[in-house]
Amino acid sequence: MIYLSIDKKVKEKFIYQQIYEEIKKNILIGRIQPNEKLLPKRVLAHQLKVSLNSVINAYDQLLAEGYIYTLERKGYFAERIQAFVSQEEILNPLPADLKESVTDKSGWISLSHMTANTSDFPFKEWIRSQQKAILVHQNELSEIIHPQGPYIVRETIARLVAFNRGVICEPEQVVIGDGTISLIRQLMDIQNKNSVISIENPGYQRLYKLLERMKFQVLPVNMDNKGIKIKEIQPSHFVFVTPSHQFPTGIIMPISRRIELLNWASEGEDRYIVEDDYDSEFKYETDNIPSLQSLDRNQRVIYIGTFSKTMLPGLRISYMVLPPKLLRIYRHKYADLMQPSNTLNLFALHYFIESGGYQKHVKRMNSYYETKRKILIKELANRFGDNLQIDNIPAGLHIFIHIKSNKDYEEIEERARQLRLEIYTMKRFLLTENKQKSGLINLVIGFANLPEDKIKEAVNRLFQVFH
C-alpha cells in the first residue's frame, strides 16, 4: 500500500492537487508499478480523511494527462511510463549567461531615438475605435483574415499615404505586417539569393544584420550631403534608403539625387529601391517632402511605412506597398501566410483614421515636437557653446549633433550609464569599421519621449558626460 503525504494546512495548493502530485511522483519514480491498481476513490478518501470530490478531481487529472488508465468495473491502474534519462537535466537551473536582469529605470533620462510619446496619445479616442471595431467586425475577429490584412484597412492606408505622402497605389498593393523588419524579411525572402544589396552607411544596424543573416551580399554605401552616393551602388539589385529623413544623419535627399536614384533603378533589369519612410510625418517649418515613390514612373520603388512613430511602437503595425510584379510573386509565395498583426487593432486603426482622430493627433504632435525640438536645440547650444555643432534639419524625431571631445565612444557611453542618461553614439550606426574622427563625438539625440521639464536636466547630464 502506498501512503500519500497530504498537508491540509497548506493554502498554496488544493487538496486534490496534493493528491495528484503525490500519485504522479510515485508513478514516475517507480514506487507505484506499471499496471498496479490504485486504491478505490472512496477508500483513498476515507484513508486520507478528505472529501470524495478531492480524490475524484485528482484521479481525473491523472487520467487526462495519461499517468493512469481505467478499466470498466475494475478501477484505476498506473500506466507504463519510461523513466526520464536524467532527472538532473530537468532540475538544472537556467545557465547564468541566459538570465535576464530587470533594469531599474528610476532616475534615468532617455535621449533614445526609438521611443514615442505616450503621454499625449488620445487613448480615449483609440478605445472608442476599438469598441466600434468589436461592434462592427465580430465575424471577422473570429476568422483568419487575408494574409495582407483586411481589405478595408488596406484601402484606408492607401488613401492615407496617397494624401499625406503622394504614394501611388491600390489597396491590393498594400501589405500589412507587425514591423518594418518583419516586412523586409518577407520581401527579401522572395528574391534571388544572389542579389546584391546596397544600404546607407551610417544606417540601420538591425536591417544590415538581417540581410547578412539571410546570406545576401550587402554593400554599405557612404553618404554625402545629398544622401547615398549613386556611383557606389552601381553593382546592386536593391538599394535601401531613407530619403525623407536619412537615418541617422537626418539628411533630406534633394530632388536632383532622387531623380538620379530613380534613373539608376530604371536602367537595369530587376533593380529596386526600398524607401523606408519611417518618420516623414514630422516635418517642421515647411510642408512635408513628397515620397520617392510618388516620383516613380517605372514601378521600381517599394514603399515602407509605420505607425510606430506617429502612434505607439507597441501596436506593431507597419505596411509596405509592392509594385505589381513583386506583388504577384509575393502572393504566390505567401498564399498561406497568417496575418501577424492584431486584427482588432487593425480594424481600430481603420476607424481611428476614418474619424479624423489620426490626422488630428499627428498635427497636434507635429506642433508639440517642433516646440520641444527648438527648446532642446537652444539648451544644447547654450550649454556647449562653440564645442557643439548641430545638423539642424527641421524634420523627424531626432537630431544629429557633433561635440568636441578627446574621449572615445566607449568612455562616453560608460560615463552616460553612470549618470543614468540613455544616449546613442555614432558607433551604433556605422556598418563598417571606421576610425573615430579625432576630437569629435557624434550623437543621435532623440526627443520624442523627453518631457519638456526634463530637457534642461538631460542637457546638463550630457554636459557632465563630456566633462
Image (spheres, helix red, strand yellow):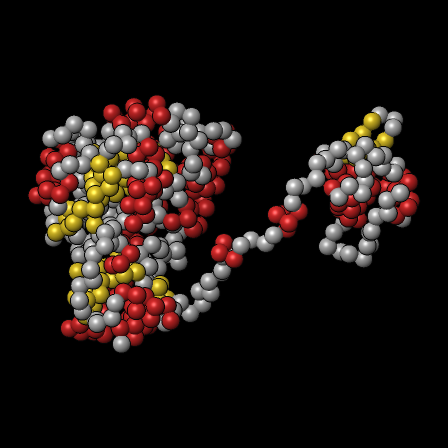
Residue 91 placement, left or right of 275: right
Q: Quadrant of residue 402?
A: bottom left
Seen in the picture, residue 459 relative to 77 is either above or below; the reply is below
Which residue occupies 88% across, 36% down? 40
Seen from this angle, which residue lies furthest left? 256
Front residue of 244/451: it is 244
- Return the x and y of residue 248 as percentages of the image width and height: 24, 54
Residue 46 placement, left or right of 88: right
Which residue occupies 33% across, 54% down? 114
Front residue of 231/339: it is 231
Front residue of 131/16: it is 16
- Return the x and y of residue 459 as percentages of the image width and height: 28, 70
Asked if residue 20 shows in the view, the reply is: no
- Return the x and y of residue 422 as percentages of the image width and height: 35, 64
Which residue occupies 85% across, 37% down? 38
Which residue occupies 38% across, 50% down? 312
Seen from this angle, which residue lies furthest front? 85
Residue 356 placement, left or right of 132: left
Q: Is the N terminus in the top left, top right, bottom left or bottom right quadrant? A: top right
Q: Is the C terminus in the top left, top right, bottom left or bottom right quadrant? A: bottom left
Counting every numbered tag in the picture gives: 0
Asked if residue 331 shows in the view, the reply is: yes
- Return the x and y of residue 294 as percentages of the image width and height: 18, 36
Seen in the picture, residue 453 relative to 325 is either above or below; the reply is below
Front residue of 168/285: it is 168
